Amino acid sequence: MEQEEERFQPENARGDDEGIYTKETVFLGPYSYNTIEDSIDEQFKDYIGLPDETDYVAIFYHQLEQSLAELRRDDEQHPEEKKALLDSVYADFIGLMETQFRLRFNITIKAIDEGDIYNLSLRDTIKALYHYFVLNAKQNIKSVIMMDIEKSVEDVGDNDDTFFHIVEDKMHDHDPLFTTMDVPTFLIYSGNREVYEYFESNDVSGNFLKKLSPKFYINEDFKVDIINAIVIHQQFHKDVYKLSQLEPPTESE
């Protein structure tokens, strides 16, 4: 009697033995969950330098959806076990984001605090906060500092050197922490209505100004960039004003 040929099974395939499925094998996609978690952690640590601008939150949700969709296939085996593992992956992700926002920015999300992690709006809340405080943090901070300084600096005429030094001195009001405004003012200056409404409705709470910092001590180029942008913006407004004061030429001219 010929011996039956043994079938090849990859390491993450399910056999008759128990315990072969793991969170790593049911979470499908090009990025492992551990890679996503580590990458998000690095982004929160350096939201100013941000060497990696990849949207890992969007990647996580996309891969989770694809993994759940795979369970609905007719030929898929042990869907309940896999679903339980994917629920565990999701809970890990929510725990990760809760910890990062709380530790790095002093922020809490109401739905997570109440244990309502399957709240339909939670995904949008997490994505909005992640974009605002991490992926777009540098631009938001720049916009806020520019508006705050431009509102507080008096006109010094055409003395650009004096204006430059005044602006440079005003930068101390925003480093290492913002000392001239409260949370609503920061959100208004940044122009993000969505995040403003999250705080206004108490769906998100916390004084992130106790943590958020431009970190000029390790980002000198960022400081110089903001100062130059303010000076250029001020000069532009001066030029526009001067042009507006010119009398239009008469028909004879």
Image: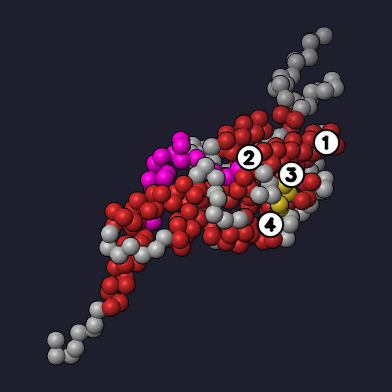
Up the image or down, 18 lies above or below 116; here it is above
| Secondary structure beneath label 2 | helix
Quarter location, residue 80: top right
Q: Earlier in the sequence, mark 4 or mark 3?
A: 3
Amino acid of disc 1? Ala
Amino acid of disc 2? Arg
- Which residue bears the numbered disc 3? 69
Q: Earlier in the sequence, mark 2 or mark 4?
A: 2
Up the image or down, 151 lies above or below 251; here it is above
* Magenta residues (range): 211-230
- Which residue bears the numbered disc 2? 104
Give the farthest residue toward the top. 1
Q: Earlier in the sequence, mark 2 or mark 3?
A: 3
- Which residue bears the numbered disc 4? 199
Residues packed near mark 4 inside 10 Å, few (<14), some (14 to 19) or many (20 plus):
some
Which of the two marks, 4 or 3, is nearer to us in this view? 4
Residues packed near mark 2 inside 10 Å, few (<14), some (14 to 19) or many (20 plus):
some
Amino acid of disc 4? Phe
Give the farthest residue toward the bottom. 252
